[in-house]
Amino acid sequence: MEVVPLERLKRSFRSSQKVIEKEISSLVNKLNDICASPEIDQQALKDLAGRLKLLKAKLAELRKEEQESIRITKVRLDYLNSLVKITNVDSDEYVRWSTIRLNTMLVDYLSRHGLNESATKLSKDCMIEDLVDLELFKQAQKIQDSLARHSCTEALQWCNENKSSLKKIKSPLEFNLRLQEYIELVREGKIPTAIQYVRKYLTPWSDLYLKEIQQAMGLLAFNSTTKCSNYRQLYDQKRWNFLINSFQMDNFTLNNLTKQPMLNLTLQAGLTALKTHSCYQSDGKNINCPVCSSESFGKLAPMLPYSHHVNSSLVCRLSGKIMDESNPPLVLPNGYVYSAMALKEMQERDGYIICPRSGATYTLMDTRKAFIS
Ligand SMILES: [Zn+2]
């Protein structure tokens, strides 16, 4: 999240560089022409001065953008740096720091799920506008909405603005958008226009996507009710969801953002420290284990690695408390183990012990102490 303004800074730097190179070389050419002519052309000089003024204004605008990116980068660095000065995790400073961190993650999560109004409100209320990337997600949402309305125009414009970066990451997004526009023309039966479209927008990609282009040409022979799977796939409206997803992924890559929300990643980092081989098993579930609660946190954990426990601790299935010297494990005659405290409590309450796994009834007298080596 911290690097978004830096990426923006790089982009505006590159575009100022381009503007300067292009304008200066054309101005120098003009100036040479003026000098070469035997008489001074007053009008040409005036035009030249006008263009220089325009260039200056454009550069001033870009400079403003750059300065804003620098300011935000500085705010984010200062925030990160303030952690170094905090020595105690129980201090009020740390609580404040981590609350801000949590709120930025929540704003990131809300923005990624299209809940921009809530994200804006939360960032305003917590005064963390400079630490979050609301604008970036708002613009992305506009493009996603237009794709959901089955229009590629805004997404193609975005591709054009980021052409060189997308080329660098070898993104197939622009090609797929062009392919979609072609498919829509064929769907509407506008065959001559579709063929012209292929010539203009798809053939330049033939080095990279020849097979796809050939298949796209085959589409001309099939209508949208075809049962032939290759062509049915091209007509499938689900392709729009695929385009939305590809755009999102490219947008994250270009801005150095993680593919998953930071909130998920942070929670997963915690969950993987807790995940054991008995998690998710119906008879190994621990009521206090977040990984085991399959309705909430457990949903984030199936793909995570198991934690490496050098020392294992025994947790009582009945009470969820750790079994140790002060609360030793007791073995029932059926072999199941529970903590002494939980069994005593049950005996005192009910007069006997019921094993929650087998339903067998015992008393404390039947139990044996277990020794762990
Ligand atoms: Zn578990």
Image: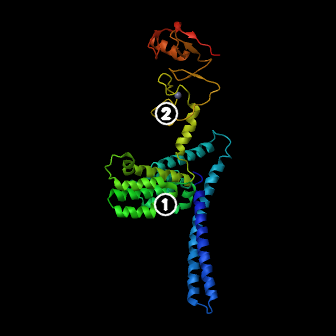
Dot 1 amino acid type: Trp
- Residue that appears at 57% across and 59% down: 8
Between discs 2 and 1, the one toward the N terminus: 1
Answer yes or no: is residue 151 visible: no
| Quarter that holds the C terminus | top right
Q: Residue 363 appears at what percent x and percent y? A: 49, 8
Residue holding disc 1: 158
Q: Residue 339 appears at what percent x and percent y? A: 55, 17
Q: Nearer the viewer, residue 42 or 134?
A: 42
Residue holding disc 2: 298
Q: Which residue is farthest bottom?
A: 39
Whether disc 2's CB lies below 8 Å from ligand 1 is answered yes
Please say which color scheme the image uses.
rainbow
- Residue that appears at 52% across and 41% down: 264
Q: Residue 163 appears at what percent x and percent y? A: 53, 61
Locate residue 287 relative to residue 328 in the image: left or right.
left
**Which quadrant of the structure image shows residue 95?**
top right
Dot 2 amino acid type: Gly
Q: Residue 258 appears at what percent x and percent y? A: 55, 48
Gap in Å between the C-alphas at discs 2 and 1? 37 Å
Whether disc 1's CB lies below 8 Å from ligand 1 is answered no
Answer yes or no: is residue 329 visible: yes
**Which quadrant of the structure image shows residue 150?**
bottom left
Q: Secondary structure at mark 2?
A: helix
Locate residue 368 relative to residue 229 in the image: left or right.
right
Q: Residues within 10 Å of mark 2 (few under 14, many from 20)?
A: some
Locate residue 267 relative to residue 212 in the image: left or right.
right
Q: Nearer the viewer, residue 162 or 16?
A: 162
**Numbered mark located on residue 30 in the image:** none
| Residue 190, above or below 355 | below
- Residue that appears at 56% across and 79% down: 51
